Image (cartoon, rainbow, N blue to C red):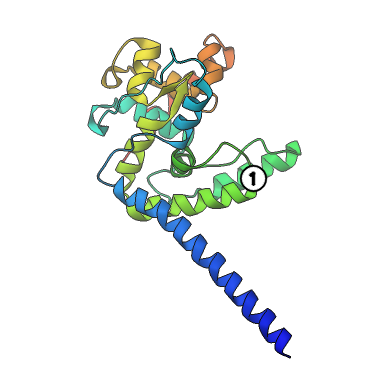
């Protein structure tokens, strides 16, 4: 009887310690998100990973410059909404219809090819998580997305996303992307340029190396035709 009681106490202690550790771990994420409501992130997990990969070549640096929301082209905002998350202003972090479509697509292909992630989920991943694809990471991404939606309004979420999204080989954010590809600032992007940048987002480093891709051109034209109807925060 005593041995059973000891085992039960040990189990409760271990479970309690694990729950406490998880709570502290999640609170660490939440504390950073709350800080970023008023302050701009200096870096992200994705940026840190790129810097780590560049470490042997000290001559390379990341291209990134923060630009306030009001100084980013409305055309780019509309293009990204069309390309990445048409229901961004309506949902609370998750597009359940999009997730279902992605699950159906994955089932047809027999492998993971689509995630149905919203802009909020993509921001959560960029800020905090590695690029691995697993159920555990997707679960953590969902928790972080919920935190972002609870702490920030849509405008702030979108502003951070626009400034930290990866847009090419060591290119991050709308300002750096506009200068890298078109030699203009983020405010000066024309509709065709904005559509092209939005079309690059799923595979930015690939399209940086393959700018004449027929698919990229076709997809950009498709985005362009839908931009006028996009709702932006």
Residue at far right of view: 110
Dividing the picture into quadrants, the one containing residue 27 is bottom left
Which residue is rendered at x = 45% and y = 15% of the image?
A: 58
Q: Is residue 212 above or below residue 169?
A: above
Image quadrant for the N terminus?
bottom right
Tag 1, which secondary structure?
loop
Q: Is residue 153 visible?
A: yes
Q: In this view, does 98 lie above or below 223?
A: below
Q: Can residue 230 be seen in this view?
A: no
Residue 33: x and y in percent read: 36, 49
Which one is in front, 74 or 135?
Answer: 135
Which one is in front, 176 or 229?
Answer: 176
- Relative placement, left or right, of 72 versus 204 is left
Residue at far bottom of view: 1
Residue 85: x and y in percent read: 46, 38
Image quadrant for the C terminus?
top left
**Residue tagged 1:** 134
Q: Answer few, some or many: residues within 10 Å of disc 1's Cα (few below 14, many 20 plus, some between 14 and 19).
A: few
Which one is in front, 30 or 155?
Answer: 30
Residue 93: x and y in percent read: 44, 50
Q: Is residue 5 above or below residue 90?
A: below
Which residue is rendered at x = 23% and y = 31% of the image?
A: 70
Residue 212: x and y in percent read: 54, 8
């Amino acid at each position: 009887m005593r041995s059973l009681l000891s085992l039960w106490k040990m189990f409760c202690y271990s479970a309690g310690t694990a729950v406490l550790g998880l709570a502290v771990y999640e609170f660490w994420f939440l504390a950073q998100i709350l800080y970023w409501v008023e302050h701009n992130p200096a870096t992200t997990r994705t940026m840190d990973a790129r810097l780590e990969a560049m470490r042997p070549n000290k001559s390379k640096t990341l291209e990134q410059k923060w630009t306030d929301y009001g100084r980013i082209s409305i055309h780019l905002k509309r293009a990204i909404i069309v390309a990445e998350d048409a229901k961004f202003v309506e949902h609370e972090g998750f597009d359940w219809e999009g997730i279902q479509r992605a699950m159906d697509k994955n089932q047809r292909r027999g492998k993971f090819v689509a995630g149905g992630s919203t802009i909020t989920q993509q921001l959560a991943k960029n800020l905090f998580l590695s690029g691995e694809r697993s159920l555990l990471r997707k679960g953590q991404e969902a928790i972080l997305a919920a935190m972002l939606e609870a702490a920030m309004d849509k405008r702030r979420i979108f502003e951070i996303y626009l400034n930290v999204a990866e847009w090419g080989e060591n290119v991050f954010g709308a300002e750096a992307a506009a200068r890298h590809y078109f030699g203009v600032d983020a405010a000066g992007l024309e509709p065709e340029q904005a559509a092209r940048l939005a079309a690059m987002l799923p595979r930015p480093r690939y399209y940086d190396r393959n700018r004449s891709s027929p698919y990229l051109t076709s997809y950009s034209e498709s985005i362009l035709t839908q931009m006028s109807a996009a709702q932006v925060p």
